[in-house]
Image (spheres, grey):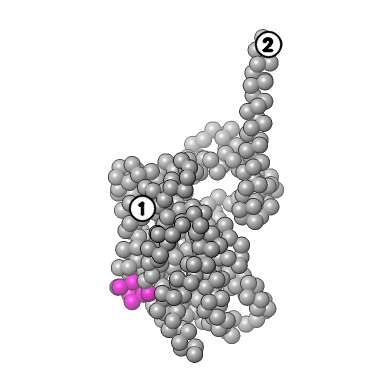
Amino acid sequence: MLNKSKYVLFSIIPLLVLFLSLEVAQRIRYSVRYNDYKWLLYGYRFQVQPVDKGIKIEKLSSKLAIEEAFSLLSIPPNTKTDRYKFIFCIGGSSTAGVFNDKYHKYPYLLNRLIGPDYIVINLGSSSRISDDYPDIIRELLLSKISLELGIFYCGYNDMFIKDVNKIYATFCNQLLNTHHIMLRYSLLISTLTEKYIIYSKNQAKTYKSDLKRYERLEKEFYKNIEECVNLLNAHKIKVVLIPEILMAKNFGTITTNYENYAEKYINIPNMLKEISAKYNCDFINLQDSFNNTDFKRYFFDTVHLTDEGNKTLSKLIFQNSRYIKELINNKE
């Protein structure tokens, strides 16, 4: 019996060492990627907010976004907002620039191109979906700032993340208490679980077998964007609609092969183009500008841009937006 215990013990110890090594590596990786040491303390003094809770907390965020924009442009925090005209950029983590430092996010880079007469505020947030946009815009309109233009860089989260968040929550509720504890204290287990669900739900075979779900997601996305455009048109605020660039490519590993994503995303640009034509919005599709480039140079993954990718994106928006050109010409 004692010999068997020794064999079990000596077989478990290497596995524990391997697991702890991977856990530490994951925490260091996230700390570097997000430029935030708190990831090292995941599950203890620091716990990432669940996606749904995080969205609710961050919904009314225009004041913070304005303060952040002022800080980036070295404008004193107590400066009155009525001295400036504003442009907002709304979207998910690619707008928020979750993998970029504050000076390499596309709204800030766009602001530098447009010039100091306009303040570009970043209303992007990780996992943010179009369901949240109308409430954010209503709150922004109540802030009484002089809004000239709204830029929507969106589509990805609504097709690939929205339902997965709900599936993830349902999945977690069905787990044993032991797994709940592991999710609570292990960043490695938490991220692997999330990646597995996203990967399994977004495989090519799921598109045809779950076509009704994707059709529902498209209809909800169309309805939300149309509602936002109507809200802004009522206040004579011009709108730019840009489908998020999707790199449906193979980035080199089993879990980073996104080649099958293209089929599910194909209707997003068409819907935004249709809304643009219907309500006289500015529509910019930049997919072709990146398709023939070294995609690994410009993208971390299928949707998140590198610093160089954001620099190129901001330049292309600046060069191709008729409404931005109008703002600059009117200023002159």
Which quadrant would residue 145 be assigned to in this image?
Answer: bottom right
Q: Is residue 54 visible?
A: yes
Of callouts 2 and 1, the N-terminal one = 2
Position of residue 147 in the picture relative to residue 37 (left or right)? left
Question: Against 74, is 135 above or below?
Answer: above
- Label 1 sits on what residue type? Ala
Relative image position of residue 17 (x, y in whole percent):
67, 31
Relative image position of residue 5 (x, y in whole percent):
67, 15
Which residues are drawn in magenta? 276-282
Q: Residues under labels 2 and 1: Cα distance? A: 56 Å
Label 2, on which residue? 3
Position of residue 193 in the picture relative to residue 273 (left or right)? right
**Residue 214 belongs to the span the image colors magenta:** no
Q: Nearer the viewer, mark 2 or mark 1?
A: 1
- Label 2 sits on what residue type? Asn
Mark 2 crowd level (few <14, some 14–19, many ≥20, 10 Å Cα) = few
Mark 1 crowd level (few <14, some 14–19, many ≥20, 10 Å Cα) = some
SS category of the residue bearing label 1: helix
Label 1, on which residue? 262
